[in-house]
Image (cartoon, rainbow, N blue to C red):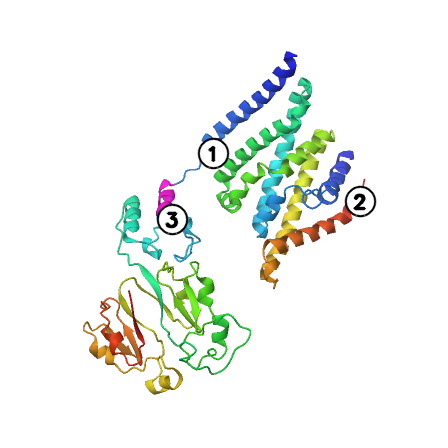
Amino acid sequence: MSYLKEFFSLAVLGVLIENFVLVKFYGICPFLGVSKKTDTALGMGMAVTFVMVLASLLTWLVQRYILIPLNVEYLQTISFILLIAALVQFVEMVVAKLVPSLYSALGIYLPLITTNCAVLGVTLINVQREYTLFQTLSFSFWSAMGFTLAIFLFAGVRERLETSNIPKYLKGFPIALITAGLIAMAFLGFQGLSF
Amino acid sequence: MLEQILYPALSIGAIGLFFGAVLAFASIIFKVEKDERIDKIAEILPGANCGGCGFAGCSAFAQAIVEDGAPVTSCNLMTAEKAQQIADIMGVEAGEVVKKFAAIHCNGSCDKCSEKCEIFGIDDCITAASLGTGPKSCEYGCMGLGSCVKVCSEDAITIENSVAVIDKEKCIGCGKCANICPKNLIEMVPQKRTAIVKCASKDKGVVVKAYCDAGCIGCKICEKKCPKEGIKVIDNLAVIDYEKCVGCGICAKECPKNVIEIIK
């Protein structure tokens, strides 16, 4: 029962209170780059979710069984970067082989996950808060869901923006950035929630 | 002391080696078999991604050539030399390729052709054409609102005196302007020395004279004077057979309305 409670409180934390994109401002690059269409945005969200959960699992294992026993925790950042980079390469190969349509849709953005601070961020937060394996997995899953929610919402807004009458000097990225700012302000309202 | 150097170096090295090995294996297991002809053909294609062929871009077209046998000549920018290269890669006959460019069949600038009404606030030919055939008295003529200018990726079209003018040097022959013009004034003609009729009006001569100083009146002088029998007057309008036209310029000289222009 306590596991279930923990799972859902981490859901509220990851998706709403500490939304990676809109509150912590991690992963802005894919947030702006892949949010022109809702279906590619969802694809990106799924790819990030997959990479985040897998990366969290692996980094937790590396932290627990390699870095702590050898007393070299200060190598966290560099070893996690190494791990995430290799992992994304791996995911890229798998997606190219198994889901070519998703691969062509994500195009150049898939390698962006490699140097995506959202993925590195979630692994470092997990380690710093000394989460258990279960907490690690649920928190990274839910923060990836938060990322997906943000990018999906934003893509929906941008699809509407395409057809609306926008002043010439605001067309394209300016209005996208303003919209992102407004959505981020809306998410500030969740700061008051706590468990 | 030794531990402080050895452990970090070893652990990072071991992690790096391990993932390197995993990636090396994965690249073998998950190798995507891709027809290498697609890349080769994509390199030969112009790379302008103009979409004139009807595919999403040059690489999509290359894929269509290889997988679905799409005709190479769909590409408006194709030269005979490039078509031959692609044909060599595919191992098929190239087919004949004629390079084309866009020519506009209207010369009725605002000083020559009168307007029957004014249309405000519309900067799009298709919309304007749907409102009582547009602002010009001549229902066939160029309205000069520039839908073709907007669609041209090479900035080859300008509006001069409310008529579109195409710069042949800049035109790459993608054909997008010809598709968008609601009056069908733009035609893709073979890139050679040829005569172009700068009018599209099918009204009778008397009617044309009433509204435009630069319109074809269907007098048939050009038809009679052409040494190659390359001009026919059909529906009160001179039409040039580009296969026969050698661009001698006799028709342009004889035309009483100076409707015919020789393009080099």
Nearer to us of marks 1 and 3 is 3
Location of residue B23 with respect to B166 vertically, above or below: above
Point out residue B180 in the picture as x, y percentages from the top left corner: 43, 66
Location of residue B260 by image quarter: bottom left
Residue topped by disc 1? B30
Point out residue A190 in the picture as x, y percentages from the top left corner: 77, 47
Please tell me whether the stretch drawn in magenta is mainly helix, strand or loop: helix
Location of residue A72 with respect to A31 vertically, above or below: above
Magenta-tinted stretch: B35-46
The CA span between labels 3 and 2 is 54 Å
Residue B20 versus residue A5: which sits nearer the camera? B20
- Judging from the image, what secondary structure is the residue with disc 2 in? loop
Q: Residue at x 60, y 53 (%)?
A: A173
Near mark 3 (Cα within 10 A), the count class, few <14, some 14-19 or many ≥20, is many
Location of residue B52 by image quarter: bottom left
* Residue sitting at the far top: B2
Residue topped by disc 2? A193
Label 2 resides on the chain identified as A
Residue A53 versus residue A126: which sits nearer the camera? A126
Residue topped by disc 3? B62
- Judging from the image, what secondary structure is the residue with disc 3 in? helix
Location of residue B10 with respect to B186 vertically, above or below: above
Q: Is residue A131 visible?
A: no
Label 3 resides on the chain identified as B
